[in-house]
Amino acid sequence: MTDPIPTETHPSRKAQIPKETTVLVVEDNVSNFVLIARMLGYLGIHCEWKTSGYEVVEYADTLSRLDLILMDIRLPYEDGYGALKKIRTAEHLKDIPIIAVTAEASEDQMRKARESGFDGFLGKPLDPDRFPEQIRRILSGDKVWEYT
């Protein structure tokens, strides 16, 4: 008898994420983006990339579908908090979950992100073993606030 397949990689778990799911990753560090893109790709999720919070709303308007935004806090030109405010004023984007993703992961930063209107918080470094389930939970409507 073989060992059971872990929940993280079981095909029926992946099937819960629609194939056309699109995530916008707002991240200025190329290495961080590549890691996130690979982990999302593993889940069968298409991702788009912006390196700054500046013009995120305009870029999001060009996407045929957008299910989630993963937003770094420390970005050039306009930080994640400024971009969040602009996204929340765009009527057609107001219901898109926006998750703060930051290396400044602490209880204080998580509280600030919550008070600013983010829908969740993931601290860096992202854990490749936990990330798939965190994304599944977020896409199913759960709130994920984790920094360790």
Image (tube, rainbow, N blue to C red):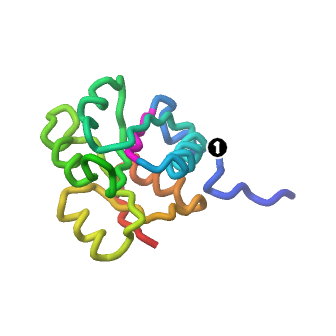
Direction from residue 12 to residue 16 in the image, left or right: left
Give the magenta part as a residue range.
Answer: 21-27
Q: Residue 103 lies in what quarter of the image?
A: bottom left
- Secondary element at tag 1: helix
Direction from residue 143 to residue 58 in the image, left or right: left
Direction from residue 128 to residue 84 in the image, left or right: left
Q: Which x, y percent locates residue 74?
A: 33, 57
Q: Quadrant of the N terminus?
A: bottom right
Q: Which x, y percent locates residue 18?
A: 48, 34
Answer whether residue 106 is magenta in the image. no
Observer-nearest of 21 and 126: 126
- Neighbourhood count class around disc 1 (C-alpha, 10 Å): few under 14, some 14–19, many 20 upward: few
Q: Residue 12 lies in what quarter of the image?
A: top right
Q: Which x, y percent locates residue 28?
A: 41, 48
What's under tag 1, amino acid-wise? Pro
Observer-nearest of 4 and 42: 42
Vertical placement of 36 versus 20: above or below?
A: below
Vertical placement of 130 versus 70: above or below?
A: below
| Residue on which disc 1 sits | 11
Q: Residue at x 57, y 40 (%)?
A: 41
Q: Residue at x 19, y 32 (%)?
A: 92
**Majority secondary structure in the magenta region:** strand
Q: Which x, y percent locates residue 116?
A: 18, 60
Q: Residue furthest bottom?
A: 107
Q: Residue at x 56, y 37 (%)?
A: 44
Observer-nearest of 92 and 52: 52
Q: Residue at x 41, y 48 (%)?
A: 27
Q: Residue 4 lies in what quarter of the image?
A: bottom right
Q: How many marks?
A: 1
Q: Residue furthest right?
A: 1
